[in-house]
Image (tube, rainbow, N blue to C red):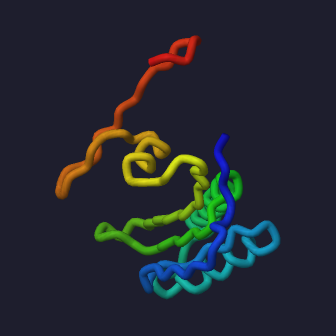
Amino acid sequence: MIRVGRPPFAFRIRGPDDWMLLDTAPNAWQRSVERILADRAVELGRLPGRQRRQLTTLLEDTVAAAQQTGVVLCLVKLARDAGDRLFCGSLALSWYDSTPVGADLAFARLAAGDAGRCSAGRRCASRSRRWSRSGTA
């Protein structure tokens, strides 16, 4: 059973200045999507209707995924890349209650499905396993 929600303590997070908070609450996400698109109009330039709809859909999909997975915080960045193509990046933070198991980096990798080791300058190697019907690897 995965237990998600809010941490049982106060916390404060600060993201990069050029990333925007995407409010994923059911009663606020639509206004948040509209605000993000309006606030980034200068950086993005005048968007044709099709591109605006694509970005809106992408942000709506991000909201839906965040709501389904219990995301605590969602930041997005809308910009243009070096080739003048639209870019949308997102960063989602979730709280996972691992009680009674103590949390550490190895457990986080396992919970995220990546038990591979990481070192500076090297990508984490993902290991996938096939489980038989009996539940063993």
Q: Is residue 90 above or below residue 18?
A: above
- Residue lying farthest to the right in this orientation: 27
Q: Nearer the viewer, residue 17 or 108?
A: 108
Q: Nearer the viewer, residue 84 or 72?
A: 72
x then y, percent, for residue 59: 61, 64
x then y, percent, for residue 32: 68, 77
Q: Is residue 103 above or below residue 7?
A: above
In the drawing, does residue 84 fall left or right of residue 31? left
x then y, percent, for residue 5: 68, 60
Q: Nearer the viewer, residue 93 or 36?
A: 93
Which quarter of the rendering shows the N terminus?
Answer: top right
Which quarter of the rendering shows the C terminus?
Answer: top left
Whether residue 53 is visible here, answered yes or no, is no
Q: Quadrant of residue 30?
A: bottom right
Q: Is residue 84 above or below residue 116?
A: below
In the drawing, does residue 24 fall left or right of residue 112? right
The residue drawn where x is 50% and y is 65% is: 90
In the drawing, does residue 54 fall left or right of residue 114? right
The residue drawn where x is 48% and y is 73% is: 78
x then y, percent, for residue 111: 49, 44
Whether residue 41 is visible here, answered yes or no, is yes
The residue drawn where x is 53% and y is 82% is: 40
